[in-house]
Image (spheres, rainbow, N blue to C red):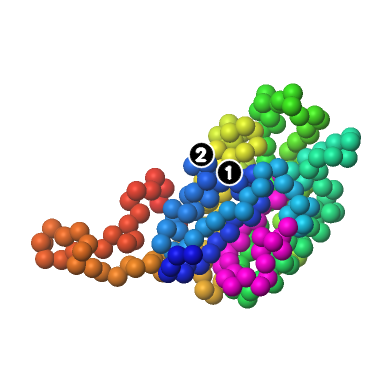
Amino acid sequence: MVGPARPLFVLFGSSIVQLSFSNGGWGAILSDIYARKADIITRGYYGWNSRRAVQIIDQVFPKDAATQPSLVIVYFGGNDSMGAHSSGLGPHVPLPEYIENMKKIAAHLKSLSDKTRLVFLSCPPLNEAKLRENASSYFSELVRTNELCRTYSEACIELCQEMGVKVVDLWTAFQKREDWLSACFTDGVHLSEEGSKIVVEEILKVLKEADWEPSVHWKSMPTEFSEDSPYDLVASDGKTTINPSEWTYHRKIQWD
């Protein structure tokens, strides 16, 4: 470990999380936004479903850990919602089990500490045509449809409302953009930089509106070592210095 200790944010989920630092991903964007404010780490597992998540959640989030996360952002559902394979193998999880698994994940994370906050992400839509174009002979009977995604997204939102968990409705958020089919995906399912920007915008909305104390919205969190210093850049008056701790000029988007 290195110091000083910062609030810990954990991104937990399937490939949407594992790839969140690739190609201008939403994890990388959040890490930039929260620079000097929080440490953001991923526990993302390509191809995983909620069933596997439940099996290992005690290892990823042990209840006796010395430091518990301040925020956990969870995404499972895209693989659960795939159509069942005739062999019984594969990532599909029936909807009732998916709901129970997500409730178990939420309950476990809530139990970590009184200050651990949760945000769940619902399933975004897919570009079904692009998925068909990218179909590989290595895989058998891959069934991904927007109707399945919608069903699991709605279930995620409903269970979060029942449990008092904050949720981002990615199904709706993506489709507010007219060109979402062409702009938001790299392969029809995984997120492009434009798709990741939508995820970030929606997460920040939730964090800003949440009545949590302390707040985990980036503008409300202290910046590490942000005091004025005579070693900062000298101002045009030649007598004072300019503190750059809060500068965000480098960002293409000035996030709220």
Is residue 197 placed above or below 57 in the rendered structure?
above
SS at circle 2: loop
Q: Position of residue 250 (x, y in %)?
A: 34, 48
Is residue 154 placed above or below 235 in the rendered structure?
above
Q: Position of residue 161 (x, y in %)?
A: 72, 63
| Residue drawn at (84%, 39%) of the image | 89
Relative to the observer, which residue lies in front, 204 or 245? 245
Residue 134: assigned label? none
Q: Which residues are magenta?
A: 56-78
- Residue kind at label 2, given as amino acid type: Asn
Q: Is residue 73 left or right of residue 242?
A: right
Q: Which residue is mark 2?
A: 23
| Residue drawn at (55%, 61%) of the image | 9
Is residue 110 placed above or below 169 in the rendered structure?
below
Where, quadrant-wise, is the C terminus in this rendering? bottom left
Residue 19: quadrant of the picture: top right
Residue 92: quadrant of the picture: top right
Q: Position of residue 63 (x, y in %)?
A: 68, 71
- Residue kind at label 1, given as amino acid type: Leu
Q: Is residue 252 magenta?
A: no
Q: How many marks?
A: 2
| Residue drawn at (57%, 71%) of the image | 67
Q: Which residue is mark 1?
A: 19
Relative to the observer, which residue lies in front, 252 or 94? 94
SS at circle 1: loop
Q: Is any part of residue 124 visible from this angle?
A: no
Marks 1 and 2 in Cβ contact (< 8 Å): yes
Q: Is residue 77 magenta?
A: yes
Is residue 222 placed above or below 119 in the rendered structure?
below
